[in-house]
Amino acid sequence: MELVNYLVSNRIGYITLNRPEKKNALSFELVAELKATFKKAEEDELAKVIVLKANGDAFCAGADLAYLQQLQTNSLAENLEDSNHLKELFLQVYTLKKVVIAQVQGHALAGGCGLATVCDVVFSAPAANFGYTEVRIGFVPAIVMAFLIRKIGEGRAKFLLLSGEVINAHQALELGLINNVVPGENLVDAVNQFASMLVKNNSTQSMETVKKMIFEIQSLNLHDALSYASTKNAEARLTQDCKNGISAFLNKSRPSW
């Protein structure tokens, strides 16, 4: 059985975690398949937007603890290689050219919560819980930290990372960890409607540029950030997408994206 499934429908690429018997825990093999599948989806001209979802009751329970226990007998260099494996996945999702929407139907904990964190938009069912529980087993939520502080700020990140507290979907929404809480029976439709809206209404080129800018601009000081933004603003005006979009608006028609 494949650990990750991939399907494209109506220009939406669906990446599905498929290890339900282990609550989609992140083994080395699962992370490797995710990396390969995200690369495939990014290069797939038939997929404009990506949805990350999971089979089973849990979205992702985090690292496979049995696998982590085996790694404790390895050297620091060997553990660093494995740690970099997960780092590469998180960075890949965060910087992917295409918008990535997480469809969280069940618990997203530890590394699983990290996986949801690096997605661009997160829809969750009310029954899902979120938490970075690593400190409760003597581990550290190290890799996700760089992304979480960017996403919700230092104060809120400290609360979640230091306490290891598990929060419900509505609390996650209040903290800015996720974007929408949708009744479980409506979750699939809500995600599909949002993804379809992006496909229909938005320029692929514009979404790619905006996502890249959000990543780049946070590492710049204000002066450099504004110079970078001005350059991107000027470049965007000369793109064919911008010309088509403005022309369609003035002609009271809808551009075909």
Image: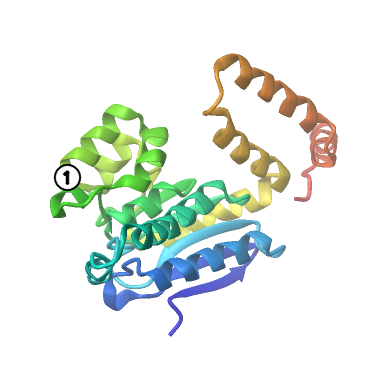
Q: In this orientation, which residue lies closer to the viewer: 199 or 29? A: 29
Which amino acid, mark 1? Glu
Foreground pick, 106 / 209: 209
Percent across and percent down for residue 190 are 46, 55
Left or right: 89, with 233 as reference point: left
Compared with 93, 70 (above or below) is below
- Can you give x and y, in whole percent of width and height, for residue 20 in the image? 32, 75
Density class for disc 1 (Cα within 10 Å; few <14, some 14-19, many ≥20) is some
Residue appearing at x 77%, y 44% in the figure: 254
Q: Which residue is mark 1?
A: 165
Query: For numbered disc 1, what is the local secondary structure?
Result: loop
Q: In this rendering, is residue 209 above or below 87?
A: above
User: By what rule are the colours in the image chosen?
Assistant: rainbow
Query: Does residue 41 show up?
Result: yes
Q: Quadrant of residue 25?
A: bottom left
In the rendered structure, the answer to whether residue 217 lies left or right of residue 234 reads: left
Which residue is painted at 33% across and 69% down in the image? 24
- Percent x, y of residue 189: 46, 60
Residue at 46%, 81% in the rendered image: 2
Picture mark count = 1
Res. 31 image quadrant: bottom left
Q: Residue at x 44, y 53 (%)?
A: 87
Given the current orientation, which residue lies at the most extreme top position?
Answer: 223
Q: Is residue 208 above or below residue 18?
A: above
Image coordinates for residue 108, horizontal then vertical, percent: 30, 56
Q: Is residue 223 left or right of residue 16?
A: right
Q: Quadrant where the N terminus lies?
A: bottom left
User: Residue 194, can we see it?
Assistant: no
